[in-house]
Amino acid sequence: MCAREARGAAAPGVGALYLHIPFCARKCAYCDFASRAARPGDPLVAAYVRALEAQLEEAASLGLLEGCETAYVGGGTPSLLGPSLLGGLVERVVRTCAPGELSSEANPDSLTDEVIDALRRAGATRLSVGVQSLDDAELACLGRLHDAASARERVRAAVASGLDVSVDLMCATPGQTDASWARTLAGAVALGVGHVSVYPLQIEEGTEFDRRYADDPCAFNDPDVQANRMTQAQAVLEGHGLARYEVASYARPGRECRHNIAYWTGVPYLGLGTKASSMLDVKLYLRLCGAVPGLPEPPAGTARVRLTVESGARAIAGDPRLSALSLSTEFLGAREAAAEDLMLAMRMTRGAGPGLLGRAREAIPAERLEGALREAVDTGLAAWSAGRLVPTQRGWLLGNELYGLMWDLAGTC
């Protein structure tokens, strides 16, 4: 039996794998991610990567990675690891579970030619570059280490390597105007990328921006400004052949991020690294419990389990065994899982199809479900199209209202 047939014959594991790299050159002013500044050559960085590689092997030995289709190395700044550490980690992922799509995040200031080459040789297929803006003043205000010229040059180098390249852009930021945002959008498209993600700035508690703008009404980040900039992005990107497939994601045909789609469509996934999240069905959770005996038994009626790694980077580096991890858990019943899937489906242009709606009707009281679906349509947040409930333009712009309407279906009344 060939290796692929053997893998297919095994009990299925997660569909997606996430590895979190919590190190960066400097914390950006808006960032509330699980990340910390690290000096070049910091021994903790190498020890942490070795620990992730050991956890990969242990997860594979439990059958958790059988059939894994996508993997994503995020952060923090994975490219800060350099060609040897990052390339070695990616190579280990490929050797362990051979995903069809393997993405790594990068920042322009650490995306050297050597890192790009190491990723390509190790088996990465996709690179997501944190550009954020192509305006030098805006980049400086955000606390980014690169300028617009270096971002353009590094993205072009990545595209030339043959990797599938995406760029992240941020709108409704200090100093940004409609004109500067239009220049950033057009400049990103001109780099030849196949995917663009656009996000309005969120001023998160505990960040430098939170302290800086605590007593400022932040007119630059007003909800109407956010909506205008996202509408502007849609017009520019779709006008250049990148179709929206998710509320913040645009891609050329066939260049969508399969890993992120897995998150939005209820595919089980495993997250390794500090603050990484997992979503497992009960069978996979019980398989993990075999290695982590301290995990609680799932309550009767559990449909899925969400876990978060609470162990810090130093603790993980010091003891990489899965049994040594501190994990928080959240157990969801069938009704909660169905409501969550409906909520996430409203992020996608394809919305909720007959299969998902059928599962929701089995788990959620008919009066509640049908009432919520009617309300979504009556308020213009969603519409029916060929048997699918899909978000409208109003639904895109008032996403929190639409998502809240679906998640409220998880309630007991």
Image (cartoon, rainbow, N blue to C red):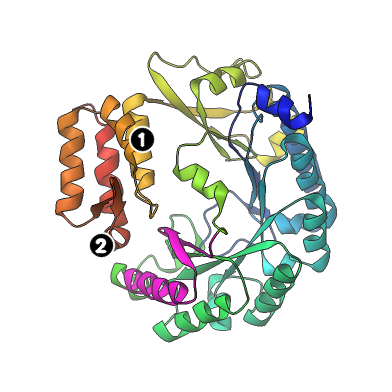
Magenta span: 225-253
Image side of residue 333 versus residue 387, left or right: right
| Mark 2 nearby-residue class (10 Å; few <14, some 14–19, many ≥20) | few
Image mark for residue 355: 1
Amino acid type at circle 2 is: Arg
Q: Is residue 332 above or below residue 102?
A: above
Q: Is residue 272 above or below residue 387?
A: above
- Position of the C terminus, as image quadrant, is top left
- Could you tell me residue 220's position as x and y percent? 37, 75
- Could you tell me residue 23's position as x and y percent? 68, 53
The residue sitting at the bottom extreme is 179
Secondary structure beneath dot 2 equals: helix
Look at 42% across and 23% down and name the residue there: 303
Residue, disc 2: 394
- Could you tell me residue 147's position as x and y percent? 64, 79
Q: Which mark is in front, 2 or 1?
A: 1
Contact between marks 2 and 1 (CB within 8 A): the answer is no
Amino acid type at circle 1 is: Gly
Residue 242: in magenta span: yes
Numbered circles on residues, count = 2
The tag earlier along the polypeptide, 2 or 1, is 1
Residue 357: in magenta span: no
- Position of the N terminus, as image quadrant, is top right
Residue 115 appearing in the image: yes
Secondary structure beneath dot 1 equals: helix
Q: Is residue 242 above or below residue 176?
A: above
